[in-house]
């Protein structure tokens, strides 16, 4: 790894290229808004005073136009860095946020935040070199991340974006991530982080635009706000995003919490941005405002400074109607302009880390994926494997790009799928691959390499790439593509220009069995929208044009299945009957003239031949490794998905989809050891898997190096030490209704029934022991703090990491949690090594929330448990702290 360090740089290094613009002189001195000796707030005030009302309204929207006389380039505020710079082309893709949470590693989160900020700045500067007039969406240096909503219910599809179910864990990880992005200089930010979505927001996705959460003061203060408080008070986040839903009847972007709790009580000095179109939701969803002018006035006065959307176009109308004063807009604009100054977008000054080489970032992504691996079961020590076995690799996630990436992702260079990682580890000859099943019945699947052959018999198709959209001239490159499943969003293969290339793929298609197949080509089509280039792809099989925009078969990602008799949708795949398993000539002409997320040749194939191939692979091998779970095409944000067990991006069942369980049952029946690798965001609660798998590895959506990390873990080059950031329940029937935001019977703190796997759980290939914890004093006065120290020993034969966890059981009240996480630290211990770990405890960690939402430290005995998991579930030891008196703790 390249050593990282902080440096202050001036215009030449970090300034937006061409940042200096001609501005009017103010006498013999620069105008105040250009005077770097003044504070950002003073400069911003002067800048805003020179804007017209129409300019002010435009600058309060996410696509802000240029104002050259004020040195303002056009600027797209919308950018995402949930687990790497997203949607801006090629960028490092780290494990999905829930996987990062499984590392329980605050130092790692800081390093990742730092690397992201640097890469984001590089992307921003490159965009300005292409167009010096400004940057558009996904190229700015303020970031709408992290998502620190509490993953209160495993049915929520966006839970993959969060840091799990515990407020303390989420807050600690968020604070480190924010620090990594923003840096230490309050006047020169590397970037600005935006914790979201404030507040009490976690589904259901189909209801989010008009849903009101009537949450108790206790749950509000105990569960839903602590992580946000940490992110703002301790992390000093420069921005905050308000949510779609309403809280206690008031839309989150137009309610009293922003100016009250956030700015007054927590001292927030940054700017608030709306979730996209949430101001419009006040009109169309919540119906709390009659039109955009009224909604915009409410939002601005409530403290929402920036609108992701177009509702703030109506702000001049709102001023004219007397719904708000122009000074209300000025207050918001001064926050926005001060942020642009701090980001170096006016005069080009900023603070950033020294840039890691691409190799260094890739190594960091691999380290994160290694640390995220959670070993949940290992019967008879089937793992680690020796690396010399004959291995059957099966399952729909074994070679699926989407299940490396997760959602809110960049486009990785040279991603390593699990199949590729295992081939490198075990050797090509020792790995037999069969996809085995689709993710769920009736869902399209990228046609696997086993069904494609090049002209010279290699797996895949021959790809000929042209540096134009016309297949004209000499090819820019030729290569073999094992599968046709790519993420070209805002990018292109190396050496080509985004949205200006074409590809011709040729070879043969070999169906695994005779039968009916449904074939389509996946592109995000503009059918619902007028204007813009149409998708341009044609697929010929045996010389017959089968798929094209005119004939249909050009499919949007994961549309609802069309099952009614005679039902047909414009993007439905095309049915074709194969009478044999002979090779059939295939040609694909693909033109990239507009952006879409995924480019893929897909099919729906008969189920039994896929299972038969997987069973044959298992029988010929020493061990079966099955890559099953979910994908971001099944769980995610407001999706058009309605397969059994899934609804609108959320889930209605926690079990493994039936198609995948049938595959596992068939593989298990061969009698060969079955290792199940779960690639998911949300939890899989499947009794059959728990009872029959010889080992279970939770691998998440592990990022660009995920296949390497999984292979390293399976053979012991990486000793797993990830810990679950959520509880894995037995069944959805054990939970309250999804729409119920009360925390009773939710998460490890308030759920008292049996579960499959506990929050904080994770196994290792070594073992650890804890000595009796010690305290500086056994008794303290309420309002004070202390620290818990414990000696931890690696008692096994392998080096490994341990996640030391501190849980506090507090004096019981009618609302008390069973126990609560109050500290943690990930450490590395060599075999036989002992290390002392000290974890601080402050008054807030010892406090409890009462029925009115107040934090209080109560007198009594506090049980402190330090171990590798929750009390009674992992090796550890405990001590008792006695607190005298009572103390109030700030909100």
Image (cartoon, rainbow, N blue to C red):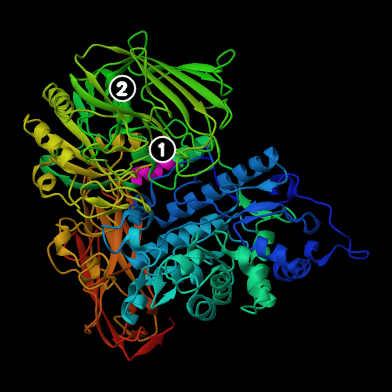
Which residue is depicted at the point 57% across and 70% down?
296
User: Residue 366: within the magenta?
Assistant: yes
**Which stretch is magenta?**
365-371
Q: Nearer the viewer, mark 2 or mark 1?
A: 2
> Which of the pair 608/9 is nearer the observer?
608
> Could you say which is closer to the camera, residue 40 or residue 801?
40
Name the residue beneath numbered marker 1: 704
387 relative to 173 in the view: left or right: left
Tell me where residue 557 appears, x and y as whole percent. Answer: 37, 40
Counting other residues with Cα less than 10 Å from the Cα at mark 2, is it few (<14), some (14-19), or many (20 or more)? many
Q: Please say if 678 is above or below 512.
A: below
Vertical placement of 403 versus 651: above or below? above
Q: Which mark is residue 449?
A: 2
What kind of element bears circle 1? loop
Q: Position of residue 733 (x, y in %)?
A: 14, 61
Q: Earlier in the sequence, mark 2 or mark 1?
A: 2
Any mark on residue 39, and which?
none
Q: Is residue 264 magenta?
A: no
Q: Quadrant of residue 425?
A: top left
The span from disc 2 to disc 1 (Cα, nearest Å) is 20 Å
């Amino acid at each position: 790894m390249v050593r990282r360090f902080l440096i202050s740089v001036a215009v030449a290094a970090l300034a937006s290229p061409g940042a200096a613009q001609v501005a009017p002189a103010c006498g013999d001195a620069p105008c105040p808004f250009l005077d770097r000796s003044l504070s950002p707030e003073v400069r911003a005030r002067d800048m805003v005073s020179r804007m017209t009302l129409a300019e002010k309204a435009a600058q309060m929207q996410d696509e802000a136009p240029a104002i050259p006389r004020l040195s303002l380039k056009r600027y797209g505020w919308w950018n995402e860095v949930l687990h790497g710079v997203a949607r801006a082309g090629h960028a490092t893709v780290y494990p999905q946020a829930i996987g990062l949470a499984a590392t329980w590693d605050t130092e790692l989160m800081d390093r990742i935040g730092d690397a992201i900020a640097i890469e984001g700045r590089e992307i921003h500067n490159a965009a300005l070199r292409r167009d010096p007039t400004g940057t558009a969406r996904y190229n700015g240096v303020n970031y709408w991340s992290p998502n620190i909503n509490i993953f209160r219910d495993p049915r929520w599809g966006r839970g993959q974006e969060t840091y799990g179910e515990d407020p303390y864990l989420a807050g600690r990880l968020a604070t480190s991530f924010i620090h990594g992005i923003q840096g230490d200089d309050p006047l020169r930010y590397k970037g600005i982080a935006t914790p979201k979505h404030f507040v009490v927001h976690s589904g259901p996705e189909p209801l989010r635009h008009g849903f009101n959460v009537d949450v108790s003061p206790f749950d509000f203060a105990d569960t839903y706000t602590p992580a946000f408080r940490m992110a703002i008070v301790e992390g000093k986040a420069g921005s905050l995003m308000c949510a779609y839903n309403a809280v206690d009847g008031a839309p989150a972007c137009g309610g009293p919490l922003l100016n009250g709790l956030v700015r007054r009580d927590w001292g927030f000095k940054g700017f608030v941005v709306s979730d996209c179109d949430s101001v419009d939701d006040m009109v169309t969803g919540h119906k709390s405002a009659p039109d955009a002018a009224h909604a915009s006035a409410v939002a601005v006065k409530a403290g929402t400074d920036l609108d992701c959307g177009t509702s703030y176009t109506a702000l001049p109308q709102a001023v004219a109607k007397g719904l708000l004063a122009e000074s209300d807009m000025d207050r918001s604009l001064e926050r926005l302009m001060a942020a642009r100054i701090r980001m170096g977008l006016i005069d080009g000054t900023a603070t950033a880390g020294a840039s890691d080489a691409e190799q260094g970032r890739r190594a960091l992504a691999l380290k994160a994926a290694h640390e995220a691996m959670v070993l949940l079961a290992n019967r008879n020590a089937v793992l680690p494997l020796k690396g010399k076995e004959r291995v059957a690799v099966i399952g729909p996630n074994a070679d699926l790009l989407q299940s490396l990436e997760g959602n809110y992702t960049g486009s990785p260079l040279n991603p390593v799928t699990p199949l590729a990682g295992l081939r490198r580890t075990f050797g090509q000859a020792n790995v037999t691959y069969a996809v085995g099943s689709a993710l769920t019945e009736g869902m399209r699947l990228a046609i696997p390499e086993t069904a494609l052959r090049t002209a010279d018999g290699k797996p895949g198709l021959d790809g000929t790439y042209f540096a134009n959209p016309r297949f004209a001239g000499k090819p820019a490159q030729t290569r073999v593509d094992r599968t046709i499943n790519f993420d070209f969003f805002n990018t292109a293969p190396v050496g080509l220009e985004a949205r200006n290339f074409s590809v011709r793929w040729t070879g043969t298609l070999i169906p695994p069995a005779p039968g009916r197949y449904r074939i389509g080509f996946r592109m995000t089509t503009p059918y619902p929208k007028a204007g813009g280039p149409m998708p341009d792809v044609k697929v010929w099989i045996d010389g017959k044009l089968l798929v094209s925009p005119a004939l249909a078969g050009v499919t949007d990602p994961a549309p609802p299945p069309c099952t009614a008799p005679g039902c047909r949708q414009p993007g439905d795949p095309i049915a074709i009957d194969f009478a044999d398993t002979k090779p059939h000539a295939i040609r694909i002409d693909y033109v990239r003239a507009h952006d879409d997320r995924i480019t893929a040749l897909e099919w729906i194939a008969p189920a039994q031949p896929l299972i038969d191939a997987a069973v044959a692979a298992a029988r010929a091998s020493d061990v079966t490794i099955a890559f099953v779970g979910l994908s971001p095409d099944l769980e995610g944000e407001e999706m058009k998905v309605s397969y059994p067990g899934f609804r609108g991006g959320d889930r209605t069942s926690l079990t493994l989809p039936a198609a995948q369980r049938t595959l596992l049952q068939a593989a298990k029946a061969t009698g060969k050891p079955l290792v199940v690798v779960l690639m998911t965001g949300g939890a899989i609660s499947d009794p059959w898997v728990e009872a029959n798998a010889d080992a279970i590895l939770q691998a998440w959506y592990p990022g660009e190096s995920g296949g390497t990390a999984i292979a390293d873990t399976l053979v012991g080059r990486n000793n797993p030490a990830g810990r679950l950031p959520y509880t894995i329940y037995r069944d959805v029937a054990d939970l309250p209704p999804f729409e119920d935001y009360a925390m009773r019977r939710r998460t490890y703190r308030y759920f008292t029934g049996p579960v499959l796997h506990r929050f904080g759980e994770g196994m290792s290939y070594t073992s650890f022991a804890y000595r009796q914890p010690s305290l500086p004093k056994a008794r303290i006065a309420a309002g004070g703090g202390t620290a818990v120290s414990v000696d931890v020993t690696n008692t096994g034969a392998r080096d490994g990491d341990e996640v030391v966890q501190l849980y506090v059981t507090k004096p019981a009240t009618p609302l008390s949690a069973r126990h609560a996480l109050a500290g943690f630290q990930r450490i590395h211990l060599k075999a036989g090594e002992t290390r002392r770990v000290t974890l601080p405890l402050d008054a807030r960690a010892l406090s409890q929330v009462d029925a009115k939402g107040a934090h209080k430290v109560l007198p009594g005995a506090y049980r402190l448990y330090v171990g590798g998991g929750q009390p009674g579930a992992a090796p550890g030891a405990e001590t008792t702290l006695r607190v005298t008196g009572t103390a109030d703790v700030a909100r």
